[in-house]
Image: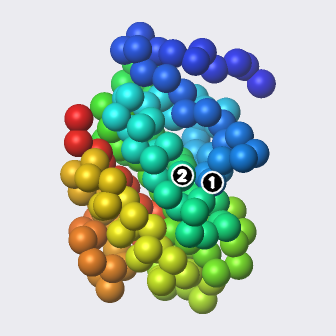
């Protein structure tokens, strides 16, 4: 696999690719961190979130697409150019590190609600898109049945 440079032309860094001790794992396309170039505020948010989450739950949070090097365009995304947006998977009851729709049996609404609350408690969130309207402080968006789109304040 081709090595992804640690830093892009904007000075954004690739999210560390899920060190074993972290409370998160990585996913997304392209793989290997090539879609995970993050603004310093986003890196701070993710590391704060995973630290807080690791203290309350053993399951890891799935961190997906953030930004391509130089702010290029993701296929099927009109966003994710600023390094201030990240896709984060909804949580599963079985702890598997694969997607789950909020309408499926393995979806853990209570844990996903706690994760959303933890995100807002950081004071860094601008908005969260996710289609489970039973969770407070999320907004509906097309194609957001199995992941949250989180935007942080610059």
Give left or right: position of 10 versus 35: left
**Whether residue 144 is visible:** no
Residue hosting label 2: 51
Relative vertical location of residue 17 with respect to residue 95 in this rendering, above or below: above
Mark 2 neighbour density, 10 Å: few (under 14) some (14–19) many (20 or more): some
As measured in the structure, the alpha-carbon distance from the residue carrying label 1 to the one carrying label 2 is 7 Å
**Whether residue 66 is visible:** yes
Q: In which quarter of the image is residue 129?
A: bottom left
Give left or right: position of 36 versus 59: left
Q: At x 71% / y 40%, what residue is drawn?
A: 19
Q: Which residue lies furthest to the front in this view?
A: 55
Q: Nearer the viewer, mark 1 or mark 2?
A: 2
Relative vertical location of residue 9 with respect to residue 82 in this rendering, above or below: above
Residue hosting label 1: 23
Local SS, label 2: helix
Q: Quadrant of residue 1?
A: top right
Q: At x 64% / y 81%, what residue is drawn?
A: 93
């Amino acid at each position: 696999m081709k090595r992804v440079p640690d830093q892009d032309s904007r000075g954004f860094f690739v999210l560390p690719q899920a060190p074993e001790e972290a409370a998160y794992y990585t996913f997304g396309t392209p793989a290997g961190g090539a879609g995970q170039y993050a603004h310093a505020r986003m890196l701070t948010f993710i590391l704060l979130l995973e630290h807080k989450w690791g203290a309350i739950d053993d399951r890891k949070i799935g961190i997906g697409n953030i930004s391509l090097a130089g702010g290029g365009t993701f296929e099927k995304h009109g966003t994710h150019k600023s390094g201030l947006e990240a896709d984060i998977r909804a949580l599963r009851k079985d702890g598997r590190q694969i997607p789950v729709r909020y309408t499926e049996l393995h979806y853990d609404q209570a844990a996903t609600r706690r994760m959303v609350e933890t995100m807002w408690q950081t004071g860094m969130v601008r908005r969260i898109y996710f289609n489970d309207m039973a969770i407070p402080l999320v907004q509906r968006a097309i194609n957001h049945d199995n992941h949250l789109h989180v935007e942080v304040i610059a």
